[in-house]
Amino acid sequence: MQTIPLAHPMDELKHRLRQILDVIPPRSNIYYIDYPVHGNGGDLLIMKGTETFFKDYQINVRARYSVYDFPEKLPIPKDHIIVLHGGGNFGDLYPAHQKLREKIVSDYPGHRVVILPQTIFYKNNFEFNRTATIFNRHPDLHLYVRDTLSADMAKDKFKTCNIYLSPDMAHQLWPIQNRYNPDKDLLFFLRTDIEKTTEQEQLEASGLGDCLDWSTLYSKVEQKSIRFFSKMLEKGSGALPVSKIWGAYTDYLVKKAVDRFGSYKKVQTSRLHGHILSCLMDKPNVLIDNSYGKNANYYRTWTSGITSARLLANQTKK
């Protein structure tokens, strides 16, 4: 009897994103808010996955706004769904994005508001309670979270909010084909920000592989170009379609990341999207946990079944 091969685990993760269609049905009209305009390639992968999701299911994006150019008072048609970008900035580590998120929820009680898959982290429980007070006033708020810990936290605080467990939006990009045969052995793709750990520092000191982060993957000219886009949005661009131009430029930035990852046989990374990009390319990779468990929680929730990926986590973390 002929056996039917099992689907790749990444097929299942991509398929799970279809649950979002329950609250953003195909052919919906939406406003897409807080799309990223910075050099963090992880957020760019999320954005590309999100835009691909919209295209694949004929979801009509009627307007796009970033944290830099969202107007103080913006009239939005009542039948349009407000969709907020996903990622890992939900909480009090990245206040600009959280303030915009809370402003949307507070200012548009008559609209359906959907927050795409996020990881939740608060250092200060007072701030978490303040967010909960705002969210619990909204009658049609839908929050997708990327791991079981975030789901438990959200269900505890957001009593009137609809909470769903979902993979990251970048999974909509599966599969990403590698155009090159890798000619280098090991890439360390490691954080250089507040989320790095001592385990990561030990790997950096080992000298075993090439070290990169988003800030060093992109050249000084590219970093300057990225800052130019954010300044253009802050100042107002008139008739210039900045979001459309930015979309084309980020195609180039994401392609550069794919090509660089493609030149290595394996990856060790403390960037969640270094891990997700490796999985999207079906490349062997080791995920190192970040400072507050985001990476380990994501791996245990979604990617532990991928044979080419494994987790290097601090076993003392809860």
Image (cartoon, rainbow, N blue to C red):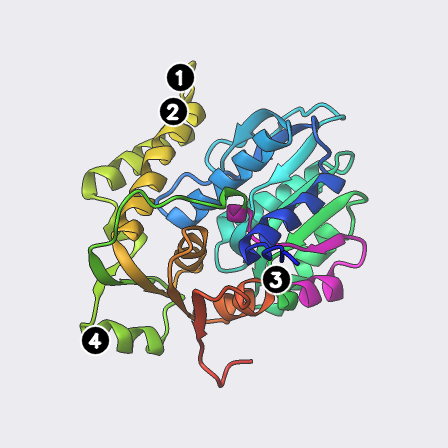
Residues at marks 1 and 2 touching, judged by CB atoms closer than 8 Å: yes
Q: Amino acid at mark 3?
A: Glu
Q: Amino acid at mark 2?
A: Ile
Residue 167: x and y in percent read 59, 54
The C terminus: image quadrant: bottom right
Q: Are marks 1 and 3 in contact (CB under 8 Å)?
A: no
* Residue at the spot of label 4: 205
Relative to 193, residue 173 above or below = above
Q: Earlier in the sequence, mark 2 or mark 3?
A: 3
Q: Read off the residue under disc 3.
A: 127
Q: Quick check: can you spot residue 72?
A: no
Does label 1 or label 3 sit earlier along the sequence? 3
Distance (Cα) linking label 2 and label 4: 40 Å
Calculate the distance from the C-alpha at mark 1 to the C-alpha at mark 2: 9 Å
Nearer-N-terminus badge (1/2): 1
Q: Is residue 94 magenta?
A: no
Please state the horizontal and vertical placement of residue 291, each as a whole percent of the image.
44, 71
Q: Nearer the viewer, mark 2 or mark 3?
A: 2
Does the magenta run of residues contain 164?
yes
The image shows residue 239, relative to residue 69, as above or below, that is: above
Foreground residue among 10 and 158: 10
**Residue flagged by tag 1: what amino acid is it?**
Leu
SS for callout 1:
loop
Give how far across and how far down residue 126 sits, in percent. 63, 66
Q: Which residue is mark 2?
A: 245
What residue range appears in magenta?
A: 151-171
Q: Position of residue 246 (x, y in %)?
A: 39, 29
Residue 103, image quadrant: top right
| In this picture, residue 129 sits left or right of residue 303 | right
Outermost residue to the bottom: 316
